[in-house]
Amino acid sequence: MSQPLIQLRNVTKTYSRGGETLTVLDDLALDMDAGGYFALMGPSGSGKTTLLNLIGGLDRADTGSIRIGEDDLAQMGTGELAEWRSRSVGFVFQGFNLIPVLTARENVELPLLLAPLKGSERKKRAEYALQLVGLADRMNHRPSQLSGGQEQRVAIARAIVTDPTLILADEPTGDLDRASAEQVLELLGKLNGELKKTILMVTHDPHAAECAKTIVHMDKGGLGRIETREPRKPSAAGVAGR
Amino acid sequence: MPWRLVFKNITKHWLRSTLTVGSIVLAIFLLCLLRSLVVALDAGVRASAVDRLVVQSSVSLFVYLPESYEAKIAEVDGVRTVCRWNWFGGYYQEPSNFFAQFATDVDDFLTAYPEVEVIEGSVEDFRRERQACLVGADTASRFGFKVGDNVPLIGALFPRTDGQPWNFKVAGIYRSKKTNVDNSTLFFHTEYLEKALESGESGGPSGVGIFVVQLEPGADRVAVAGAIDEQFAGGPQRTQTNTEAEFQAQFVSMVGNVPLFVSSIGMGVMIAILLAALNTMLMAAREQTRDVGVLKALGFSDGSVFGLMITQSLILCGLGGAMGILLAKATEPVLIYLLSTTFPGYAVTGETLQLAVFVTLGIGVFAGITPAWRAKNLQVITALRATA
Ligand SMILES: Nc1ncnc2c1ncn2[C@@H]1O[C@H](COP(=O)(O)OP(=O)(O)OP(=O)(O)O)[C@@H](O)[C@H]1O
Ligand SMILES: [Mg+2]
């Protein structure tokens, strides 16, 4: 492999709370290759979300450099960073974070508003993305009319609709039951296998982590073991569909 | 900018949006109404003629001047006509049926007040017959007085000894072309009143309430007024001569306290309504904190979320303001009719509308700026963490 897609060097992140400083990430270095499927595991409070947010450009490191492809996030201004996010990253959060007043299709269309596209083209792409996640028949439902699993699949459709190279998912199965979780994992596997998306997924759940090709363990500000393994094939089969 | 989101955020909570818009409609309507009442109060002053002076007692408007002053005022250089005005203070059937009546020198009155236009009946009949009267169009339509009708008025200030009402014959109905003369007054002959007092048919004060002086063209108002007052400086009654505008302004300041009181309350109510609307909008904005975080995570700029929040506020306020203005304009004819006696000259002027537009935009910005600013500066991770 040539250059890794994600390159972290000497990354430090501290939070200060009431005079106390808490070092969450301490001089961290990490490479992730394009096309990889990474699971980030570790105890609560070990800094998984913090790391994910730094890589996704939602927050800034105190020191060190974060390079994604050709881009050095530390060098970008707030506006540039927002624009970079809209082009390069798809986010999937634990709480789904769909906009409640919008329908599934409108939620998926949202990131496309930032691209120079005609309304009809946006609609077409949003519908295609929803089809990919198997929700073509739920396009005009609002989040409150969907199940948790369906909501998360809508969120995944929203994450991939701009065709980003990198998908960042923070405990995407955290709020889901087994069957829905398997569906989501199956979908992520498909995005990695068929659409060649690089995926970084934070999870507590060993079942979920097993689906990744690489498992990165985190512990108290630093990286622990990194295991590369044959991923488990998630099977939603046998567990009823929606 | 996600317009669809603006639209949906507003329509999703339609009850809340409707109530917010409704309260702004009310506040803006109230603003227009109060402004227009103030306009009405000032209308008489603004429309006042420049060629008329009013002579009154320097003590008070309620102190009578001697009859003999008329001839002396007429002698002053620059005076064209002098016309006596006496407050009659009668009522038609019920004391609550109030409208003003004045005893005047009819010929001088008609010369000095070209804006008073007789629209029905005959000026000549009014001049000729002692018991004739001229009635304002609003009062005529209020009580259904027609030309030729006999109008009996109970003389409260000038009670007749026989206990009967005074009788006036409607010779004409007038409409004033300017707001300094309202359309609800009844004018009749001073001689009618004088004769009754002299013959003892009626009791009541003698003397003259005010003299209205019409100036010769080109006469110097200030000089003439000074000359008149100087004449009576040695008594028996000192006078104060004002321009008609100053004279009218005196009434505005007399009733001035009441409208001020009413408009202070109105303003208070308006501000309370606005604060309630503001509070609702701030609450609505707070509910959108997570949405703002999501939008930012997706790559929407700080500027666009700022725009989103302030647009929502401007749309709600703009809608409310526009409807409030329309309501004020739509009710204008009705209010002109209803307020013709109490507030003649009620008008929703362009200036009032401008003020309303300005206040509407002000509220929109004021209510939108705080949430918009907060949204702009909100950190994505804080917004997402708030609900995770
Ligand atoms: N904005 C913040 N201000 C202060 N402290 C913070 C902030 N964000 C995170 N922290 C602290 O940093 C540490 C790491 O938080 P982080 O959310 O990255 O953990 P995590 O590994 O994702 O945990 P979990 O598995 O519970 O989600 C925690 O102790 C947390 O309290
Ligand atoms: Mg976390």
Image (cartoon, coloured by chain):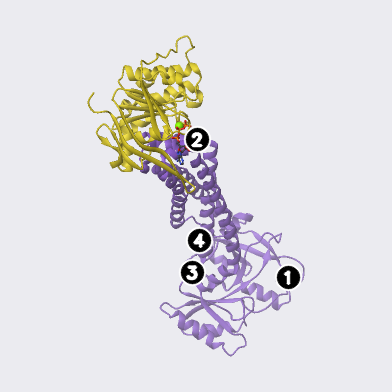
Chain colours: A yellow, B purple
Q: Residues within 10 Å of mark 4 (few under 14, many from 20)?
A: many
Q: Quadrant of residue B16?
A: top right
Q: Residues within 10 Å of mark 1 (few under 14, many from 20)?
A: some
Q: Amino acid at mark 2?
A: Thr
Q: Nearer the viewer, mark 1 or mark 2?
A: 2
Q: Nearer the viewer, mark 3 or mark 4?
A: 4
Q: Which residue is the site of mark 3?
A: B48
Mark drawn on residue B39: 4
Distance between the alpha carbons at the discs numbered 2 and 3: 67 Å
Q: Amino acid at mark 1?
A: Pro
The answer, for residue B341, to whether it is visible in the render is no
Distance between the alpha carbons at the discs numbered 1 and 3: 33 Å
Residues at badges 2 and 3 in contact (C-beta under 8 Å)?
no
Disc nearer the start of the sequence (2/3): 3
Task: Find residue B144 and report its horizontal and vertical position in percent.
Answer: 62, 54
Distance between the alpha carbons at the discs numbered 3 and 4: 14 Å
Q: Residues within 10 Å of mark 3 (few under 14, many from 20)?
A: many
Residues at badges 3 and 4 in contact (C-beta under 8 Å)?
no
Distance between the alpha carbons at the discs numbered 4 and 2: 53 Å
Q: Residue at x 41, y 18 (%)?
A: A210
The answer, for residue B162, to whether it is visible in the render is yes
Q: Which residue is the site of mark 2?
A: B387
Mark drawn on residue B1: none
Disc nearer the start of the sequence (4/2): 4
Q: Quadrant of the N terminus of chain B?
A: top left
Q: Which residue is the site of mark 1?
A: B159
Q: Residue at x 33, y 20 (%)?
A: A192
Q: Which chain does the residue under circle 4 lie in?
A: B
Residues at badges 4 and 1 in contact (C-beta under 8 Å)?
no
Disc nearer the start of the sequence (4/1): 4
Task: Find residue A131 and report its horizontal and vertical position in percent.
Answer: 38, 18
Q: Residue furthest left?
A: A2
